[in-house]
């Protein structure tokens, strides 16, 4: 059990299980993208640990890049606007794999897809370490999924609670 600030978390997915699963995902990506030199785009901050371990299991040529999304209240009544920051690679005619820590409602990923599609990549796939199927509200198709999990808050392995817990090598669930 770990305590982060005011909350207690119990062990959920251990480090060895995560690494075993990433090995399989890496092999699948290698098989699917031979000769295609895909570009993996990690969504900061949460995906930093996942992508750094995942790429070690991919044995075809790849590129790696990172983006950050920012959400803010727009001036229009439509409310929240998400924009992408940090993308410095031309994605036109490239095979793009978005690498995310967790897809919850799917709203963030939906917005990321909308923005990246404009850049006319050859293909756009999603790899997420965690997926909460019961929380999903947007039509997101994740091609490479680490683990499907229940609709409960998790930390560790890149995921934070109030900025803390990202350095834990395993995943914990809110008690
Ligand atoms: P969505 O837009 O899919 O609802 O949420 C995506 C973002 O919410 C994730 O990238 C992550 O930052 C945050 N999030 C959703 N569920 C969890 C969770 O269980 N734990 C943590 N640490 N963050 C979460």
Image: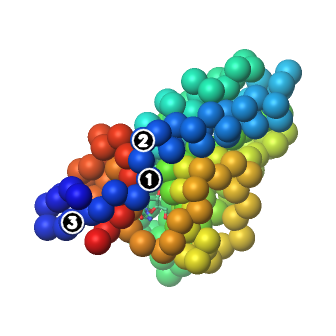
Please indicate whether residue 153 sits to the left or right of residue 88 in the image. Answer: left
Q: Residue furthest bottom?
A: 77
Residue 46 position in % (x across, y down): 42, 47
| Whether the residue under disc 1 has CB within 8 Å of ligand 1 | no
Classed neighbour count for the residue bearing mark 3: other residues with Cα under 10 Å, few (<14), some (14–19), many (≥20): few
Q: Quadrant of ligand 1?
A: bottom left
Residue 145 in sight here: yes
Decide if residue 147 is on the left or right side of residue 119.
left
Relative height, residue 36 to residue 92 (above, below) = above
Location of residue 64 (image quadrant)? top right
Marks 2 and 3, Cα distance to the nearest angstrom? Answer: 19 Å
Give the residue pinned by disc 1: 13
Question: In terms of secondary structure, where does tag 1 sit?
Answer: strand
Report which residue position mark 2 lands on. 15
Quadrant for residue 158, please give it. top left
For this rendering, which residue is in front, 73 or 37? Answer: 37
Rendered location of residue 116, percent (x, y): 68, 48
Q: Residue at x 70, y 64 (%)?
A: 140
- Residue at 60 percent across and 42 percent down: it is 21
Q: Is residue 89 visible?
A: no
């Amino acid at each position: 059990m770990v305590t982060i600030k005011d909350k207690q978390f119990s062990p959920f997915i251990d480090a060895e299980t995560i690494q075993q699963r990433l090995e399989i995902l890496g092999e699948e990506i290698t098989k699917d993208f031979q000769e295609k030199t895909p570009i993996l785009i990690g969504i900061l901050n949460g995906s930093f640990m996942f992508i750094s371990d995942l790429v070690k299991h991919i044995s075809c040529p790849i590129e790696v890049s990172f983006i950050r999304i920012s959400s803010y209240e727009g001036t229009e009544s439509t409310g929240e606007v998400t924009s992408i920051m940090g993308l410095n690679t031309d994605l036109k005619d490239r095979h793009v794999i978005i690498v995310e820590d967790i897809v919850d409602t799917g709203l963030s990923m939906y917005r990321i897809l909308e923005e990246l599609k404009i850049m006319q990549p050859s293909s756009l796939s999603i790899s997420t370490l965690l997926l909460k199927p019961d929380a999903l509200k947007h039509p997101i198709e994740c091609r490479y999924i680490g683990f499907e999990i229940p609709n409960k808050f998790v930390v560790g392995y890149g995921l934070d609670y109030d900025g803390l817990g990202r350095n834990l090598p395993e995943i914990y669930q809110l008690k």
